[in-house]
Amino acid sequence: MKNVARLALGATLSLALVACASPSGQPWTPPPSAAETEAPASQAPASVAPESAAPASAAPESPAPVASETPAGARTIDLAYTADAQIQLDGATATDIPVTPGEEITFRITNNAGVPHSFWIGPNGSLMLGQLDGLVGHEAWSEATPVEVVWTVPADIAGLKFGSTEGTDFSTMSGTFSLASAGPTSAPGTPAPASVAPSAGPSAASSQEPGGRVIELELTAALEIKEAGAKVVQIPVTPGETIVFKITNTAGYVHNFWIGPDTALMANQTAGLTGIPDWTDSAPKELTWVVPDDITGLFYGCTVPGHYTLMKGVFIPAP
Ligand SMILES: [Cu+2]
């Protein structure tokens, strides 16, 4: 549905652009019908290029690409959803898809399951939580007719996943992206060279200190929890490790920070939980926490009424 909405918006914008192309000063007239646009188009400025002249780079404005019209260089990946809740690529379970930053990929997904599934691309935590706003994907469908999702691979694919987010789908119907240009991580029988280092995970942002790993977070006036300026909806941790949260409230009003099960935090039931109660000042607060053996379903967030749905995240196993 969101795709349809986006396409409709795109079409509306296109019409608006055509309308704006007429000389200024004339009274506004309703957008001409498709038939009427044909003739005046010849008088239109060259910038309003007809589709035939549009290069591949104009793709985002064009309607959903049909496979046969896929621009040169773009890649189509066919996925199939099976009745036993698997995502298959070329007949095998798709757990990892190699991609190249900057390339455009058209996912063509066929749902053979007979039950609704969706397809979304985004950070693991967002997909787990069903927080799909702003993500590329397609809402649930159940028809066998293939659905297409066009995606331009971002520069940083760390932590990005794909999958269906319906019900409990994501536990089995999901996969990760890897760098297609990365090459073999290590030659068979050869020790991994020391040069593998640069691909450090998200934990690289935090520093090691004798007292434990430091994770600096910011609680903002926009009801976000940020790490190094970016909203953080998942934190990779290792059971048994000690983490020192250094948390700064930059909102100018009250926030707090608690660790616990999603339902308890949602209900602002913080008795017995680890955390920092309400505070307002901007002086950093510290919380030392030893990651428990089982982090399943363990969340963090601000439980001030009305804040949690926006200010929450999940702990995930560190890679
Ligand atoms: Cu808050």
Image (cartoon, grey):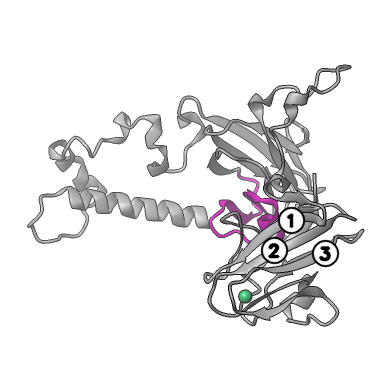
Helix, strand or loop at label 2? It is: strand
Q: Position of residue 51 (x, y in %)?
A: 31, 35
Q: Quadrant of the C terminus?
A: top right
Frontmost residue, 194 versus 184 = 194
Q: Which residue is mark 1?
A: 214
| Mark 2 CB within 8 Å of ligand 1 | no
Q: 318 above or below 1? A: above
Which amino acid does the dot numbered 1 rest on? Answer: Val
Q: Which residues are magenta?
A: 118-145
Q: Residues within 10 Å of mark 1 (few under 14, many from 20)?
A: many
Give the labeled residue for mark 3: 289
Amino acid under disc 3: Trp
* SS of the residue under disc 3: strand
Mark 3 and mark 1 lie on one chain; the one further toward the N terminus is: 1
Give the CA separation, mark 1 to mark 2.
Answer: 7 Å
Mark 2 — residue? 246
Kindly check if marks 3 and 1 are in contact, taking CB atoms under 8 A apart as contact. Answer: no
Q: In this rendering, would 289 be left or right of 307? A: right
Instruction: Please tell me whether residue 128 belongs to the stretch shown in magenta.
Output: yes
- Kindly tell me whether mark 1's CB lies below 8 Å from ligand 1: no
Q: Earlier in the sequence, mark 1 or mark 2?
A: 1
Residue 5 at x, y percent in the picture: 45, 57
Residue at 77% of width from left, 25% of height from top? Answer: 194
